[in-house]
Structure formats: C-alpha cells, structure tokens
Image: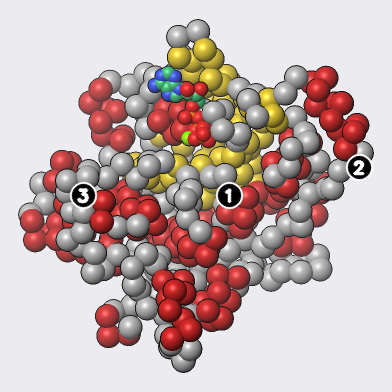
Amino acid sequence: MTGVEVKVEGLTKSFGRANIWSDVSLTLPPGEVSVLLGPSGTGKSVFLKTLIGLLKPEQGSIVIDGVDLVRCSEAELYEVRKLFGVLFQDGALFGSMNLVDNIAFPLREHTRKSETQIRDIVAEKMEMVGLQGAEGKLPGEISGGMRKRAGLARALVLDPQIVLFDEPDSGLDPVRTAYLNQLIIDLNAQTDATFLIVTHDINSAQTVPDNIGLLYRKHLAMFGPREVLLSSDEPVVAQFLNGRREGPIGMSEEKDAAQAAREMEEAGELEGLPPMKPQLAASPGMPDRAAVHRRRERVDAMLHELPPAAQRAIRESRGEGEQGSAWGPVSDGSTREVARESGYPGDTADTDDRPTDIHPRITDDTPAPPGRHQLSDDDR
Ligand SMILES: Nc1ncnc2c1ncn2[C@@H]1O[C@H](COP(=O)(O)OP(=O)(O)OP(=O)(O)O)[C@@H](O)[C@H]1O
Ligand SMILES: [Mg+2]
C-alpha cells in the first residue's frame, strides 16, 4: 500500500459571515508525514474536517485519486472517505463500548468481513499501538494516553492511505509524547500512508515531519520541506518555535501591527530560532521509510528555489555539511536513550523498587516502545 497525494487548491472556508481561512493551497506528497501548525482557533481542526468532506468549503478544490471532494457526488465522497483514517482531537471513542468494539466499529460499518477476520485485524492493530491486555476495558476506565492510542488503532483499522491526526500528543507527558512520535514514524514506515498531523508540540514539529505548514492570519503562511520553516527568519515562526509572548501572535490569535512593533522594540534583540533537531528515523527492525527516498528526489528538484538557510540545513542533514548521515534523516536516538536509561515510562512509578528490571514491557499507559510493538509475546 502506498499513500496517495492530496492536492488542495485555493480552499476558502467560512461559517456564515465569519471567514476562517482563505485561498489555502498545498500538496501532501504521497506517503510523507506533514505537520500543520498554527495558533489556537486558526482553523486547523476545521481544515482536517474539510479534507475528509465533513465540512464544505465555499471555494477551491481537494483532489484525491482524481476525484475533487468539493464537487463529487455523495457516492464518490463515500468511496474516497474509505481512504482516510482520522484521529480526532478528543479520541471520539464510544463510551459504552469496550476497546475491541470501538476499534472494530469501522470494520463492521464499512466492510463485510467475518467476525473472525475482524477479531484478527483488531488484535493486530491493538498490538501495533501497544494496547494488548486492554481489550475489554471501557474508554472511561483507561488513561488519556491509552484513549489516544485506541483512537489511533481505530483510525488504522481500514488500512487507510491517508491518516489525519488532530493533536495526537495533547495531554500526554513528554516521555509518552516521545514514544508516540516514534510510533507515528514507525507506522509510516510500515504503511507508507500519507500523514497529516496537527500539533502544538514544538518538539514533535521539529522531529517528526517531512513537511511543515503554518496556518496564520486566515492564510497558510507557508508549507514545504521541514527545513524551510525550521530555518525561516519570519518573526511569527521564531515566536512560535520559541513559545514566547513577543511577536505577532497575541492571546486572541493576533495583535494589531502597531502593538506587535512596540513590543518588539521594547524586547530589544530577541533570541533567534532554536537549533534544528534531526528528524526521527524508523526504529531498528522496521522497514525503511519509502517516503524518505521519494522525498529526497522531490526536494532535490526544488532545492535551488529554497531560501539559502533551508538549502544549508538540507545539505547538513544529508551529511554534506557538518553533521548527519549521508542518507536522509538522522535518528537522534533520543527516544531510544529514554528507553535505555529509564526502562520504560510505564515503569517510572515503581522503578526504584525494580532497579535491575530494564526490560521494556508494555503495561498500563505505555505506548509501544520503538521497534518492539511487532514482537511476539514470547519476546516480552
Ligand atoms: N461547526 C462550526 N460552526 C461554526 N463555527 C465553527 C465550527 N467549527 C469551528 N468553528 C470556528 O472555527 C474557528 C476555528 O476552529 P478550529 O477548531 O478549527 O480551531 P483550531 O485551529 O483547531 O484550534 P485549536 O488549536 O484550539 O484546536 C473557531 O473560531 C471556531 O469557533
Ligand atoms: Mg483544533
């Protein structure tokens, strides 16, 4: 299975007289991981819902597999929707169904598979996200992180070619977020599906995606290879990446230009961009990410058009500068370091009691550790 391209052109969405965003154009390259950033309320969730045809834009087109979702028939839309898996912002699980029934739901709704087949698929996806043992639990009986992973298993159950994640990391602690990020990269390596992730987590935005976009002031301010945004000298980018108050973004989304300029003057010389972090690679034992190879060719073709800082960053990441390997993204090993140093995040509460037990195990609220979620029970 290979992910499909999603081509968005000139998209405009309003609710009544309130315009949310206008003239949004971007292409999600097949099988690549893209992140969408933007201040709260800029319409990122609205964008995801528009992509799957839940909301109708007033203008523009969304072309997937040759079908324009904005203009197609209900029957065509129904077919195209089967390509999608969606992890909603709140997980959106049915409270009265246990995890197996929740995860099996799309299979029972959209396929004619037998109960035996459904059981096998659900078990496979639950293992992928490290939820074995929680089959009979109700959503109310598990932690927020487990609910996220159950939502993720449900999003994957129809083997989607496009997966949309709305803040998969919100409400998770930093260690679990690191495991979730590794899980996302590993899933991408295994499925080669096209991923779009909305996140507020700057570390995730720096280390997970191939491409980054920024929704700001009712427009898509930029979208392109990760290095472009991560090395951009736009004040709004620096403000976002540094998470600071001074800059064009205010509490109610945006400040007027005069106030922003006054603040910038008062703040004096502001810190620049944080140093660029290497992109996560798939865990050992995972297939190579096919998208990395395709992306290299794609980025090569546009390299000369990119800003000089982005070109430098891309060369460096390829080992043509001072750091990085000769081939695509480099794993910084940070999540693996966590696993090696502290055992497993689910174990943290009682690590003191078991100082010698460093064997990673999947317990309560623990995302599958890198490279381990495919292992059989015998390995644990
Ligand atoms: N169904 C709807 N009807 C009317 N207005 C809506 C609807 N859905 C969203 N909005 C409005 O659209 C705007 C963007 O909302 P959205 O949820 O997409 O923001 P967001 O960027 O996802 O924010 P956050 O980062 O806080 O999740 C908000 O002002 C919201 O009130
Ligand atoms: Mg949202």
Amino acid type, label 3: Asn
In which quadrant of the rendered image does the C terminus lie? bottom left
Label 1: how many Cα within 10 Å (few below 14, some 14–19, many 20+)? some
Residue identified by numbered label 2? 269
Q: Is residue 181 visible?
A: no
Residues at marks 2 and 3, CA–CA distance in whole angstroms:
52 Å
Q: Secondary structure at mark 1?
A: loop
**Residue 201 numbered tag:** 1
Q: Position of residue 266 (x, y in %)?
A: 90, 33
Residue identified by numbered label 3? 102
Residue pictured at 45% horizontal, 9% vertical: 16
Quarter residue 68 falls in:
top left
Going from the N terminus, do you reach mark 3 or mark 1 first?
3
Quarter residue 223 falls in:
top right
Q: Is residue 39 left or right of residue 314?
A: left
Number of dots carrying numbers: 3
Q: Position of residue 98 (x, y in %)?
A: 18, 53
